[in-house]
Amino acid sequence: MPDFAHRTFLEVAFADGKVLPIVISCPGIAAAFDPKCMPEPVVPLAYPRPGSGGYTDTPENATPFPSLDPNAVDRARPLQVPRLVVPITALGRRTIVVGTAQLPNGYLAQGDFALSDPWPSSVLFNDGIRLEIRPTGGGSPLQNLYEHGWHEGVEQVEATITFDVAWFEPGATFTIVNVVVR
């Protein structure tokens, strides 16, 4: 006998009048992070999380991260973007540059953003939206304090937003708010 506990049955009506039944399956713990399985769907957002989780995970036998140089702290410049409207013009993966920041000794204290509408109705994304913070001098995105390491003076970084559009209505936009990189 099939287990229907993690399935939702829907009827979808199309513009031509045709109605088709569909089944949405939501098994396991990971389904809680899948928009189609959420009680109120939201676009999944990914960004470095200083102060909680992976960014400050300390590898075994690691030397503690050095204190920040006060001169580098004084010269650091955050990136703050209160609102950025993003027009959607094509399907597929896209990366946009949000701006640059200067981090004291390469230390990321905050990397954050949100959407003004957590589930925009005129665009559908594959795999959510990701904020990446990457040194402008080259190198991998900042994901872990110890992998990235301590840098002399201030380090300039570039913040980008990456997303993959699966569907959109003509003229669609979405709005990113409260981008902070410091």
Image (cartoon, grey):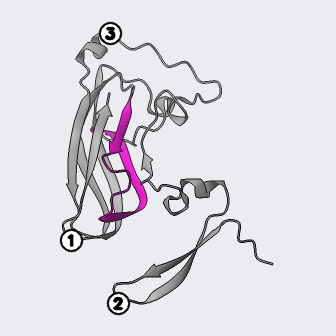
Question: Where in the figure is residue 4, as x and y percent of width and height?
Answer: 71, 71
Residue at image location 49% in from the left, 26% down from the top: 51
Residue 70's label in the rendered image is 3
Nearer the observer: mark 3 or 1; the answer is 1
Q: Which residues are magenta?
A: 110-137
Q: Quick check: 124 left or right of 75?
A: right
Q: CA distance from mark 3 to mark 1?
A: 50 Å
Vertical relation: 72 (above or below) 163: above
Q: Which residue is mark 1?
A: 170
Of the two numbered discs 3 and 1 on the same chain, state the one appearing first in sequence. Answer: 3
Callouts 1 and 2 close, C-beta under 8 Å: no
What residue type is disc 1 on?
A: Pro
Nearer the observer: mark 1 or 2; the answer is 2
Of the two numbered discs 1 and 2 on the same chain, state the one appearing first in sequence. Answer: 2
In this view of the protein, which residue sits in the foreground, 67 or 129? 129
What residue type is disc 2 on?
A: Asp
When asked about the image quadrant of residue 177, the answer is: top left
In this view of the protein, which residue sits in the foreground, 22 or 78? 22
Tag 2 secondary structure: loop
Nearer the observer: mark 3 or 2; the answer is 2
Q: Main secondary structure of the magenta part?
A: strand
Which quarter of the figure is the C terminus placed in?
Answer: top left
Tag 1 secondary structure: loop
Vertical relation: 72 (above or below) 40: above
Q: Quick check: 119 left or right of 66?
A: left
What residue type is disc 3 on?
A: Pro
Residue positioned most to the top: 70
In the image, residue 122 lies in the stretch drawn in magenta: yes
Q: Quick check: 23 left or right of 150?
A: right
Residue 16's label in the rendered image is 2
Residue positioned most to the right: 1
Question: Where in the figure is residue 58, as x and y percent of width and height?
Answer: 58, 27
